[in-house]
Amino acid sequence: MGNIVLLDELTINKIAAGEVVDRPASIVKELIENSIDAKATNITIEIRSGGIKYIKIIDNGVGFASDDVELAFERHATSKIRKEEDLSAITSMGFRGEALASIAAISKVTLTTKNINENVGTKVQVEAGNIVSKEEIAANTGTIIEIRDVFYNVPARFKFLKKDYTEAGYIEDVVTRIALANPNVSFKYINNGKVVISTSGNGNLKATIYDIFGKEIYNNVIKLDYEYEQIKINGMLGLPTISRSTRMHQFTYINSRYIKDKTISSAIDRACEQKYAINKFPFIVLNVSLNPAHIDVNVHPAKLEVKFDDESKVFDAVYYAVKSALENYNKDTSPFTNIKKAQSVENVERVNQISKDLLNNGVIKSDYNNTKKYDFGSISSNVSNTSNSLNEEQKVEDKYEINTKTDIITENEIVNNEKNDVNDILEIKEETNINQNKEEVGEELGVNVQIEDVNNEEKEPLIYKYIGQVFDTYIIIQIKDIMYIIDQHAAHERLLFEQIKKEYYSKEKQTQLLLIPTLVELTTKEMDVVKNNLDMFEKAGFMIDIFGDNAIKISGVPNIGYDIEYKSMFKDIIDELLGANKTQNTEKEFRFLATLACKAAVKGKMKLDEKEQIALIDEMVKLDNPFTCPHGRPTAYEISKYEIERKFLRK
């Protein structure tokens, strides 16, 4: 006689239940998703003893039809799909018809419901998958499901449950994820009589974030709104100030279904790699909306994984959504935005403005065209040059202001010097009122223009003012009513990174030959890293020769222009490559270049003179991304005049 037998239905149900329900949190997830599919706008979740002893879900959805109540507890009974073809376009949260049957198989269930189209409700009691009682009852439209004694008849599963507070934590995670995906639904989560989560359900995702996470995260998130190749990305992204060392605050969804996907996670990481500190992950709530026909959600019992028919499109959509949001935010809020705008104004615009006021108002003073060049390595700068005729108070205020030498500019000088750019000067009407125009003079960014009238009023230039340095590390500048503290190492690191990256991908290599070659002894593992990445070192400007089994000779180094201990830097780069050994080549290159820039940059407490500090700032603010160093640390910190006055009780 053979050994294979058919299992009885009770055993089958218990085994199948294990695929869907592995702990109380799984029950809560399945039941909440059913409520959402039933178009509920208010959902209350109440638990006791971590959900092991008691779970109650109340919703105001459309409710079960009385004829469907018993059938709902059968396996693979569902109202979501009808035939195989429906699996290719699933829009509901549930679709397999397993949840209620699996839950009823391992617990005691009481279901009270009233359909929106019926006058009387229905109440059923189910134990171990069997319907014990069914009766009509007065009830409000919607559904109430009560679950008692989870796994009471499956002791093998029951013994693996955690302590009550741990299981309650898992349930809180489930409610949080679903609430973030459904800001238009009001959720209330009650644990042992205490309200843990309560959301408004007003449809505002940011308000939902406030309800769940509080003020700090609410104040440090920016909006995601992007569309690419018919893939829409929406959500909220946390700024680096609230980043975490784990992914615990990353919530990713496909068509509002919570999932875990490597493609999406990789795209987020890539977009954030230069904006956040290494090993820090952003807070993010990200929903990918796309045609259900392009995904398969039927690949995991808990529906946590999906398959895309084109992963690269999803990657690109998420990557550009996150990257553009960060870049736009940085440009809007960066301490360097005004300076970058000032430097982008062409001379012709400045001259036209000056010329207009010259013809209308008389003599004009300008400080825009007298500069002096200094070198900071490969960095050029415009440095202050004060007049000896200024009184001491003016010297203190203007000493470190960019381009402060003042000249008288006449109409003839402007026409002669910029005749091609000021053809419209003669067309300007002479009757322009001097009092109306004097407030406009100098408003062009980077131009300090003043009108010599009776009051000799001056217009404050919209450029930064260098103040000084503290602790031989932090450079202080002022823009209007805000003071900025700039980390010289982070700023120089970003500047060098962009310079080194440009040369790395160019055909002409800038290599500095060493008078005395440096010999570096390596371990076998380190030697393998060098051999496997020899092209990378050479592209960066290193000249390396293998010198025996465990040593190399460095005869040329990148032409960065600073006195660097290259032997130590070389080993640091190897250590970084060891940590990135299994990553993609682009990430290895990024880590390589970032480490090279970090080790070559000026350090904290490295004394820079006044001209070098100003030169560093001048060059840094010209970059497209001066906001963080390559490792994600901010280059500047701002303090407003209002904040300072509050500290001194002036406000």
Image: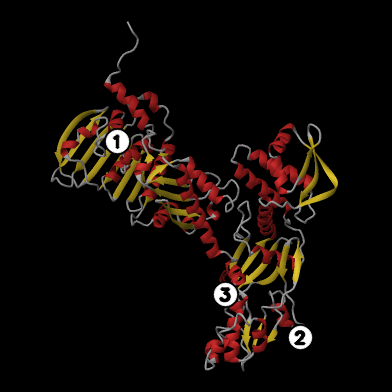
- Binning the other alpha carbons within 10 Å of mark 2 as few (below 14), some (14 to 19) or many (20 upward) gives few
Query: In which quarter of the view is residue 110 placed?
Result: top left
497 relative position to 360: left or right: right
SS assignment at label 1: strand
Q: Judge whether 150 appears above or below 482 on screen.
A: above
Q: Nearer the viewer, residue 53 or 13?
A: 13
Q: Quadrant of the C terminus?
A: bottom right
The residue shown at (41%, 40%) is 309
Disc 1: which residue = 147
Disc 2: which residue = 389
* Residues marked 3 and 1 touching at CB (< 8 Å): no
Indicate which disc residue 650 carries: 3
Q: Nearer the viewer, residue 10 or 399?
A: 399
Q: How many marks?
A: 3
- Residue 130 image offset from top left, x and y in percent: 23, 27
The residue shown at (41%, 48%) is 288
First in sequence: mark 3 or mark 1? 1
Q: Quadrant of the N terminus?
A: top left
396 relative position to 92: left or right: right
Q: Which amino acid, mark 1?
A: Ile
- Binning the other alpha carbons within 10 Å of mark 1 as few (below 14), some (14 to 19) or many (20 upward) gives many
* Residues marked 2 and 3 touching at CB (< 8 Å): no
